[in-house]
Amino acid sequence: MESQNMSTSETTALTEDTTLRLEIYSMLAHLLRKAPDQNVIDWLAALEVDAPNALKQTTGMAAAWPLLKLAAQKTTLMATEDEYQDLFIGIGRGEIVPFCSWYLTGSLMEMPLAHLRHDLKQLGFERDESVKEPEDHMAALLEVMAMLVEEGENTLQARFFNRHIATWFERFCADLKSAKSAVFYSAVGELAVQFLTVEKTRFVEAN
């Protein structure tokens, strides 16, 4: 059995990793929830992409960070607003339908949403009445993961991720990267698939 006493450097590394995971989940959720405002675009354009953190330096992630930074540097507020509109809203429907039920069944409001609502209730999450869209929007799922990471519940993180994100994120990200309207959001899709793949591996190894 391994010792429970970690050195200061090991504790710091774990804390930095957890903090970065929380920040990435929150950032991706924010970008998928709505188009970034100018402050977010400026923040992304000034990202320190060479930080010596293991999560940032994973092969796929190391390439995705500079891509997102460059995309932010080259876009404009109006361009990202138009892009988000075309991708996720459109006239009647956008190019991308970012809901778990849609990707798993081809329709909205299906059994994946019912299963999700059951799990959210078990976790103590209540639906915000001001939010009209179903809870299985990718942004909402990433927001839940951010909260679970912050709480430090590894078992709950793995269970939620594997049940509600792992089953469809790769197809969603592939669609986002290749969407006709995607420019800035193509880079968002690349970072998302690289990060969520690292998370999927993390939770497989934890079992």
Image: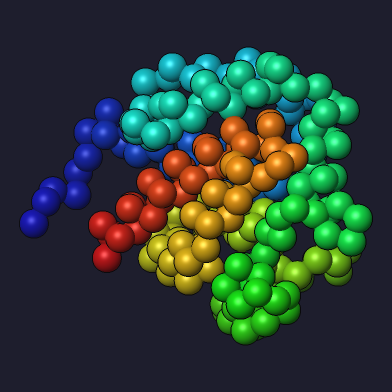
- Measuring from the top left, give residue 133's x and y in whole percent: 80, 66
Residue 135 vs residue 81: left or right?
left
Nearer to us in this view, 7 or 86:
86
As drawn, the residue found furthest toward the right would be 91
Position of residue 165 relative to residue 37, above or below, is below
Residue 183 appears in the figure: yes
Position of residue 122 relative to residue 89, above or below, is below
- Measuring from the top left, give residue 176's x and y in whole percent: 63, 47
Residue 12 appears in the figure: no
- Image mark count: 0
Position of residue 180 relative to residue 63, above or below, is below
Task: Tell me where residue 126 sits by quadrant.
Answer: bottom right
- Measuring from the top left, give residue 144's x and y in whole percent: 60, 59
- Measuring from the top left, give residue 154's x and y in whole percent: 39, 59
As drawn, the residue found furthest toward the front would be 180
Residue plotted at (22% across, 33% down): 7
Residue 62 vs residue 143: left or right?
left
Image quadrant occupied by the C terminus: bottom left
Residue plotted at (27% across, 28% down): 9
Residue 83 vs residue 45: left or right?
right
Residue plotted at (52% across, 21% down): 66
Position of residue 17 relative to residue 205, above or below, is above
Image quadrant occupied by the N terminus: bottom left
Task: Tell me where residue 186 sits by quadrant.
Answer: top right
Residue plotted at (85% across, 37% down): 82
